[in-house]
Every structure is written in structure tokens, then in C-alpha cells.
Image: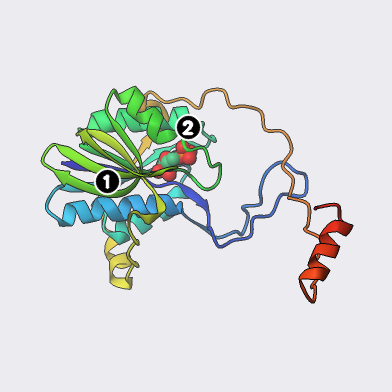
Amino acid sequence: MKILVGIKRAVDYNVRVRVKSDGSGVETDGVKMSVNPFDEIALEEALRIKEAGKADEVIVVSIGNNDVQQQLRTGLAMGADRAIQVETGDTLQPLTVARVFKALAEREGAGIVLLGKQAIDDDCNQVGQMTAALWGRPQATFASKVVIDGTTATVTREVDGGLETLEVDLPAVITSDLRLNEPRFVKLPDIMKAKRKPLDVVPLDELGGHAGAAPATGRHAAPAPRSRGVMVGDTAALVAELKNRGLV
Ligand code: AMP
């Protein structure tokens, strides 16, 4: 069984995001870019499934310009067998990304498409669900535990009221939640080895993809700075301060 893992290049989660001075977007020049954290978790899970002997190949996929090759190499260093860059210079909508994953899943004959539950740059949380719908296969999103048994996956999902366990027939789409696992660290020899692993570049239109119409983005603005708090000596002073501000 092959597992396709989506790897999106996003601003590192430790970076304090700054809005460009003209409000046209967020600053990415000279900013540390990384693998979207949920995708690192998805890849870790795919590697564990392979290490347990339940998959033969893990393929990392990123859609974007040549910069995404950095994140694909990180995926290869973590242990993926090969990488595919779907090349485009356009910013894509989740529906286009889902069309790409559907086309690749069919082309590769994937048993699982493992994605992050969402990308932390646009917080869409749409690609997994749309891929499953287009592909006509089951989906198990927000996974916090995945058990593969033959042609079924038992997936524990984090839902508002607690946990829900689903059994889905493979092929299927699974998206990772934060508590699914803790991704491994990449070691130096693995980074060297990753340089020799295959990385194919496929143009977006070869997979029937086109950027499509994107919604026009208005202005980006940083949140208003928070005003300083005040320290109060005791509960009476706290209540007086809250009354003073009309909060009680
Ligand atoms: P989203 O629905 O946009 O929040 O993205 C959900 C997941 O889809 C991400 O965590 C990735 O696994 C995958 N994904 C989204 N965009 C891309 C991309 N450009 N390249 C590779 N994977 C992507």
C-alpha cells in the first residue's frame, strides 16, 4: 500500500507573523518557513504505519513553486521514500489542491491520503474533506489514533463532545490532529541521505489542475495592541476595578 502525505510550506509556527506595510499580505521575505505542523504529524503517522509493515511506500507531495522542495527534502529526511512537487507559481484554493490530491491518489493507486487537519497559514480545514468527496472515498478527519488492519482503518477522532471512533474502508483520506503523535527529529545523516532520494516535478496542468478563480483578498491588518493590565492588591480592589470599567 502507498501512502500519499501532503506537505505544505508555511511560516514557521514560532515566528511572530508581521503584516506587510501596504496591508497586502503577511511578510514572508527573510522569514523562517517550515513544514505545516499538522503535516509533520501526518508524515510521522505514515512512517509509523510503514514501519509496522502495513504500507510499502510513503510519498510526500507539495504543491507550489521550487521553494517547496526544501520542505519536501525535510519530509524525505524524516523517512519518506520519494517526493512529488506539483509545480505552480499561483496561490491555490483548497478545491484546486483537493483536485490535485485526487488525481495523484488515482495515478499512484494510493491506499491512504494522509493530510494535516488544516494549514496554519490560511486555517481553511477543507482539503481533506474535499479530496475524499472528489475521490469518492471515505474520510476520517481530526485523527488522534489510527489503527490499520488489512483494508480497514480504525480512526479515533477528536470531536467537540470527546472522542469518536470510525471504521473506514481503504482507500480513504485521513487528516491528523495535534495529539496523533510526536514527530521524530531529523538527524544529520538522514538529511544527507535525503539528497539522493527521488523528487519528481509535475506541472499542475499535467494533473488537470488550474489555479481557478481566487476570492479577492481585502486588507490585512495586525490586531490592535492590547492595553497594559493593572495589578490589584486584593479581591475588593479587583471588584472595584471591574465596576470602574463597567464589567460587573
Ligand atoms: P487546508 O484545508 O488548506 O487547511 O489544508 C489541509 C491540508 O491539506 C494541509 O495540512 C496539507 O496536508 C494539505 N495541503 C494544503 N495545501 C497544500 C499544498 N499547497 N501542498 C501540499 N499539501 C497541501
Of tags 1 and 2, the one toward the viewer is: 2
Residue at 24%, 30% in the rendered image: 107
Residue 80, given in percent of the width and then of the height, sits at 26, 53
Task: Name the residue that disc number 2 marks.
Answer: 94
Give the SS element for disc 1.
strand
Answer with left or right where residue 242 lies relative to residue 2: right
Q: Amino acid at mark 1?
A: Ile
Which quadrant: the N terminus?
A: top left
Q: Quadrant of ligand 1?
A: top left
Q: Is residue 138 above or below residue 40?
A: above
Mark 2 surroundings: few (<14), some (14-19) or many (≥20) residues within 10 A: some
Residue at 61%, 59% in the rendered image: 30
Task: Name the residue that disc number 1 marks.
Answer: 59
Answer with left or right where residue 179 lies relative to residue 109: right
Residue 192, given in percent of the width and then of the height, sits at 30, 67
Residue at 45%, 28% in the rendered image: 96
Residue at 35%, 33% in the rendered image: 101
Residue 29, given in percent of the width and then of the height, sits at 63, 55
Q: Amino acid at mark 2?
A: Pro
Is disc 2's CB within 8 Å of ligand 1?
yes
